[in-house]
Amino acid sequence: MSQPVSKGGRPTGEEAERRLKRLLDVARRHFLAFGYRETGLESVAREAGVSKKTLYHHFGSKAGVFAAVLAALREKWITELRRVVLGSEEPREVLKAVALHILDVGTRPEMIALHRLLVAEAHRFPQLVSGHYHNGAPSGMEPLVAYLRTAVASGALSIDNPTLAAEQFTYLVLGGIRTRLLLSVTRRPTRAERVSIARHAVRIFVVGCAREADL
């Protein structure tokens, strides 16, 4: 089946976007399977059906490809999290939905593999990983930060620093189980187990952020 092209013979915007998505999907699989240093752009380009020259034209370097992979994952995460946060206004319900989402995504084998990759490459390629954490990673929790600010403004929660609170909530929910998964000393929790983890985390967090009048 032929793909749509513009009058000048170039791919349409839709086709170009589809090709870019495929390229980043292939690159992500290679990075997770072989690591950053061992991934070759030639093999990525070949599997994605593009030339190596095209790959360099779009991303400039392997570091550029890796950054684009992380950016695509981050954008998808932000979109999904924003949808979750908008599902309710009651803090417990919002936070429970967010906690379940964090646990669902954060304990997937692919995400554990990505976390392992970032930890491993932080020593060998510190600028590569620090750039992600300093420039992009904080935006990943912005939907939750924005919700917490709204909850504080309405008087539903008492939080001095919503950005820090969002980070602490994430670690409260995911920290323990993710560490065990990274060390391969446990299996991924079932849906029922994730619900239980989320419920306990939300209870602790909400009590800690309750207004003095509610204590």
Image (tube, helix red, strand yellow):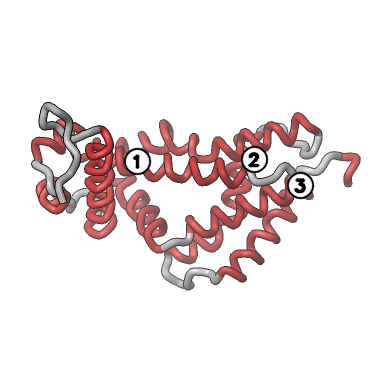
Label 3: element kind: helix
**x, y percent for residue 137:** 45, 38
* Displayed quadrant of residue 204: bottom right
Between 19 and 24, which is closer to the camera in this rendering? 19
Q: At label 2, which amino acid type do we have? A: Ala
For the point 75% across and 45% down, the residue is 90
Earlier in the chain: of badge 2 and badge 1, it is 1
Query: In the image, what residue occupies the spot 74% across and 33% down?
Result: 152
Whole-Å distance between the Cαs marked 2 and 1?
23 Å
**Mark on residue 81?**
none
Residue pointed to by mark 3? 208
Q: Nearer the viewer, residue 155 or 34?
A: 155
Mark 2 — residue? Answer: 165
With 107 as the anchor, is 57 left or right in this view?
Answer: left
Crowding at mark 1 (Cα within 10 Å: few <14, some 14-19, many 20+): many
| Residue located at (43% from left, 44% from top) | 76
Residue at disc 2, secondary structure: helix
Residue closest to the eye, 54 or 15: 15
